[in-house]
Amino acid sequence: MKTIELRTITIIILLAGILSCQKKETVVTTEPGALQINISSPSEGTIVKKGDQVAIKADISYISQLHGYIVQITLDDGTIVFETEGHAHSDKITVEEYWNDTLSYEANLNLLLTAVVDHDENQKIAKVAFKSQP
Amino acid sequence: MKYIIGCALLLFSSTIADACDVCGASSGNQNLGLLPQMYRHFAGIQYQYNSFSSTHVPLSDNQPVEYSDEYYRNVQVWGRYCIGRKWQLFAFVPYRYNRSTYTGQTEPSQGIGDATLLVNYTFIQTSDSSESPIQHRLQGGAGIKAPTGSYKGVSVLEKQGLPNMQPGTGAWDIPLNLNYTLKYNNTGLNMDCSYNITTANRDNYKYGNRLNTQLLAFYWLQGSAVSVLPQIGTRYEYALHDYDNYNRKWLNEQTGGYILSGVAGVQVYYNNIGLQLQYSKPFTQNYGAGNIKAIQRVDAGLMFLL
């Protein structure tokens, strides 16, 4: 009887050990087309004016799980005039952010959309150039 | 008679670590700890308070790091029904009140949690007729945790690998437990291990399996009508990573980890009534890739032997 009980306990412990294994999807981040970014707004060369609300819309897709995105609007010299970010654990992200143009001078702007795959700096950046006029 | 009381004593501890074990929130384990008179039914109510602080690391280096605090409160009705001298049935029905403060805003979440049913078998038990000053008992069993609690889908915080504040998990789990008590005269040791095998919920989110183990030393001070049992020990909680999508094996490495805590408490018995109070504070921990810190935990309980 004691042997059976010992066996039962051993099985429980072994079962717990086996259930402690964790599989993880293996993905090659550099695979061509693995990470795609499609920015639908603003379009290249768009001119916006002070007081306009600029819609930033994009779709990001990846062959595995994404971690999030970073949206930046910068001046030509790299100065950031707007930045926001979003987290998502999915293979598809729909980005919809808004920036209110408060610039009182003419400026060449760049929209930089970074798709973040993981915390190991696996990411891709897409860029759209547009202009602001007062 | 003294022996029977002493043996029965192998008291109760009811460190029900179900709310947020290693921050598993509603997916935590059910520890039984030290239990009173093993051939009697009982019913009781328990309260647990657990607090954590979390660090939210931004994706961009330009964004500031933000912080939040999480407070988990759990009131639980539980009971034991003895079937013969070997089998015992346990049931737990929790009500959770969780609160998170993040960027100055407080987000409460409350409701009935996931109910658990456990069946335990006594593998080893010192005979009642034994005159030996050494007594021991080994029990183990398994059960099921049903998704009876409120669950509204994967939250934003969970997507970030941070604690789930919802009362329910939306998933069925299989809890296993092993409980050993060794007593020499009025002094004893209790080791309690529970392992929770989780399954994926409707969103394919799967909490990591969780191990919760506790070692307590206790001493039995017996008065004419009242028994007092001070206890001290340690608790180790370990959680595997969660899966954001179990079908696709999307492992969330921002979740899981361990907490090693010091535990001190006392139990008091008067006739058929038992009271319990326990406090624990982490010694060392690494949870959620170091972004989540357990602060402290308080357990209190009242039980009635039937």
Image: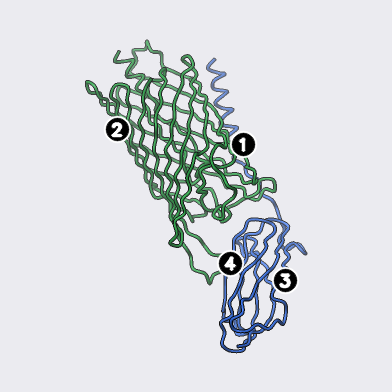
Q: Quadrant of residue B273?
A: top left
Say if mark 3 contacts mark 1, CB within 8 Å: no
Estimate how packed mark 3 is, as few (under 14), some (14 to 19) or many (20 or more) residues with alpha carbons within 10 Å.
some
Q: Amino acid at mark 3?
A: Ser
Using a 10 Å C-alpha cutoff, classify the residue at mark 4 as few (fewer than 14 neighbours), some (14 to 19) or many (20 or more).
some
> Whole-Å distance between the Cαs marked 4 and 2?
51 Å
- Quarter of the picture containing the N terminus of chain B is top left
Q: Is residue B2 above or below residue A10?
A: above
Local crowd size for mark 2, using a 10 Å CA cut-off: few (<14), some (14–19), many (≥20): some
Give the camera-side residue of B247 and B80: B80
The vertical placement of A21 against B14, above or below, is: below
Q: Which mark is on residue A18?
A: 1
The amino acid pointed to by label 2 is: Pro
SS under mark 4: strand
Marks 2 and 1, Cα distance to the nearest angstrom? 37 Å
Q: Which residue is at 37% across, 39% downward?
A: B299
Give x and y (percent) for residue B77: 43, 32
Kindly identify which chain the residue marked by label 1 belongs to.
Answer: A
* Colour chosen for chain B: green
**Label 3, label 2: how far apart the Cα atoms are:** 67 Å
Considering the numbered disc 2 on the image, is that residue within a helix, a strand or a loop?
A: strand
Task: Point out the frontmost of discs 4 and 2.
Answer: 4
Which is more toward the observer, B180 or B207?
B207
- Decide: marks 3, 2 in contact (CB < 8 A)? no
Nearer the viewer's eye, disc 3 or disc 1? 3
The blue chain is: A
